[in-house]
């Protein structure tokens, strides 16, 4: 008879794989269902995304002005 080291026998052997499976089943079962975002939440997310895009464009414009200013200063020097 082959020794089965993965099952919990009368000696009280610990089975870590079985415990992990039970823990995952418990966590997945206990996870709350995600609700669909409301119109207000969607609008706020869009406004935040638009605000960050404006900041990027503003930063690029400032960087371009600085580079152009440095180039002009070097040429006229």
Image (cartoon, grey):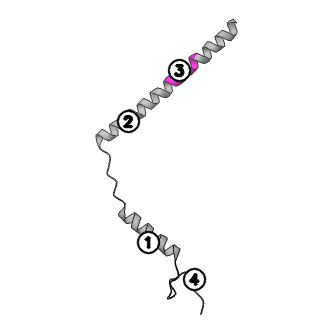
Asked whether the beta carbons under mark 3 and mark 1 sit within 8 Å of each other, the answer is no
Mark 2 vs 4, N-terminal side: 4
SS for dot 3: helix
Looking at this rendering, what residue extends furthest in the front direction? 11
Residue 18 spot, x, y in % from top left? 49, 75
Q: Which residue is mark 3?
A: 61
Does label 2 or label 3 sit earlier along the sequence? Answer: 2
- Quick one: label 1 or label 4, which is nearer the N terminus? 4
Instruction: Looking at the picture, tell me which residue is in the foreground, 23 or 29.
Output: 23
**Residue density around tag 1, few if under 14, some if 14–19, many if 20 or more, within 10 Å:** few
Query: Which residue corresponds to the image point at 53% horizontal and 82% vertical from the top-left?
Result: 13
Q: CA distance from mark 2 to mark 4?
A: 55 Å
Q: Secondary structure under badge 2?
A: helix
Residue at 54%, 19% (x, y): give it: 62
Q: Which residues are magenta?
A: 58-65
Q: Residues within 10 Å of mark 2 (few under 14, many from 20)?
A: few
Q: Which residue is mark 2?
A: 46
Label 4 sits on residue:
5
Quick one: 15 or 71, which is closer to the camera? 15
Residue identifier under label 1: 22
| SS assignment at label 4 | loop
Q: Earlier in the sequence, mark 3 or mark 4?
A: 4
- Quadrant where the C terminus sits is top right
């Amino acid at each position: 008879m082959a020794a089965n080291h993965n099952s919990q026998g009368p000696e009280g052997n610990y089975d870590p794989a079985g415990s992990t499976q039970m823990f995952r089943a418990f966590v997945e079962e206990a996870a709350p269902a995600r609700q669909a975002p409301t119109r207000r939440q969607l609008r706020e997310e869009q406004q935040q995304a638009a605000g960050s895009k404006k900041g990027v464009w503003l930063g690029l414009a400032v960087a371009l002005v600085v580079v152009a200013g440095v180039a002009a200063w070097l040429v006229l020097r």
